[in-house]
Amino acid sequence: MSTAEPILLTPGPLTTSARTRQAMMVDWGSWDDRFNQLTASLCEQLLAIINGGASHHCVPLQGSGTFAVEAAIGTLVPRDGKVLVLINGAYGKRLAKICEVLGRSFSTFETAEDEPTTAADVDRLLHADPAITHIALIHCETSTGILNPLPEIAHVIAQHGKRLIIDAMSSFGALPIDAQQVPFDALIAASGKCLEGVPGMGFVFARKEALASAAGNSHSLAMDLFDQHSYMAKTGQWRFTPPTHVVAALHEALLQYNEEGGLPARHQRYANNCQVLLEDMAALGLRSFLPAAIQAPIIVTFHAPKDPRYQFKEFYERVKAKGFILYPGKLTQVETFRVGCIGHVNQAEMHAAVAAVAEVLREMEVLEI
């Protein structure tokens, strides 16, 4: 990174490498064979990350991650289906809102923002309501950084013969998910998160049988994953104008992902970042919102200082002036701020970020020198 460019310690968009940014300096024709090959290679590499080549299709979609979540719900949940939405943060609530807007029947189960949903909860809920056909789960809830117990929940859902839709926006590429071990109809992620691409493209790993039976479900032409996949399988092309530069950047980011050592190495770097962040912030007296057992190494929520001289807007601008962009809190009950552990950053940048936080809090007279 150039020192003139701030480092993004956010959950995406995030700091990308010079190679990834350089990949966007080429213009691509959307029907060009070379670009179609780039898309096909991208989907193949993405499927390999979840060991899903035999069982799932990778369907890319223009837009942010939320576009892909809406597309998955609209395509894979029949119009007479019912979704159980598991909520412990803002993105679970957004998922429920999507069901409401799409006119899909749904129920919600909400736990506190620092309390994971359990497999026992899901088992009880499915016994109580046999009308439920699909369960929608946020794997890592970016509101706090909480990690929900996906394998255990998926196992219970499979025992009940129900279908699982996973929003893995913040976890895909860094936290292991094996499609042959964790049964799901859809797993949804995006370009601008742990793969360290740029924002602008979502993708849905859809179980082949589920996608094949989804014709006519979708509320939308543009977001019909069945139609998108059918057209791409037939022609090799996107139905509508693709985000060519985003695709090229993600392809380049995936080359670097594999050079680094794939998911184990990416997870370890983020875990190291998270550990440095937690330890250094604790030394300043700043407490994390979540206990370590349920903290994913993606983004950490910290309690804001109680000093009346602390104001987030001023804190944010002062830290930004020192080269680091943080993230506001997203909790309703307590005042917090968030610091991401992901992106093209390492432990040195995390140490430097906390040093900048310390300097700012001293300047604001919130911390004693």
Image (spheres, helix red, strand yellow):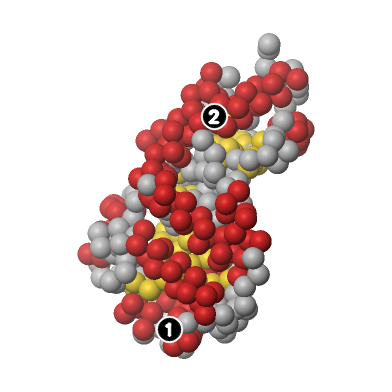
Q: Amino acid at mark 1?
A: Ala
Q: Quadrant of residue 122?
A: bottom left
Residue placed at 56% from the left, 80% from the top?
A: 32
Q: Find numbered disc 2 in the image and state the secondary structure of the residue it sits on.
A: helix
Q: Position of residue 120 (x, y in %)?
A: 29, 52
Q: Report if residue 344 is visible in the image.
A: yes
**Which residue is identified by label 2?**
348
Quarter where residue 197 is shown: bottom right
Determine the residue positioned at 47% across, 82% down.
Answer: 236
On the image, which quarter does residue 200 sit in? bottom right
Circle 2 residues within 10 Å: few <14, some 14–19, many ≥20: few
The answer to whether the residue labelled 2 contacts the one labelled 1, judged by CB atoms less than 8 Å apart, is no
Q: Residue at x 59, y 59 (%)?
A: 23
* Residue drawn 38% across the image and 74% down it: 57
Nearest the camera: 133 or 284?
A: 284
Q: Nearer the viewer, residue 340 or 292?
A: 340
Question: In x, y percent, where is residue 99?
Answer: 52, 70
User: How far from the left and from the top, in percent, is residue 171?
Assistant: 44, 51
The image shows a total of numbered marks equal to 2
Residue position marked by numbered label 1 in the rendering: 233
- Crowding around mark 1 (Cα neighbors within 10 Å: few <14, some 14 to 19, many 20+) is few
Is residue 133 visible in this depiction of the protein?
no
Residue 313 position in % (x across, y down): 75, 37
Gap between marks 2 and 1 measured at Cα: 44 Å
- Callout 1 secondary element: helix
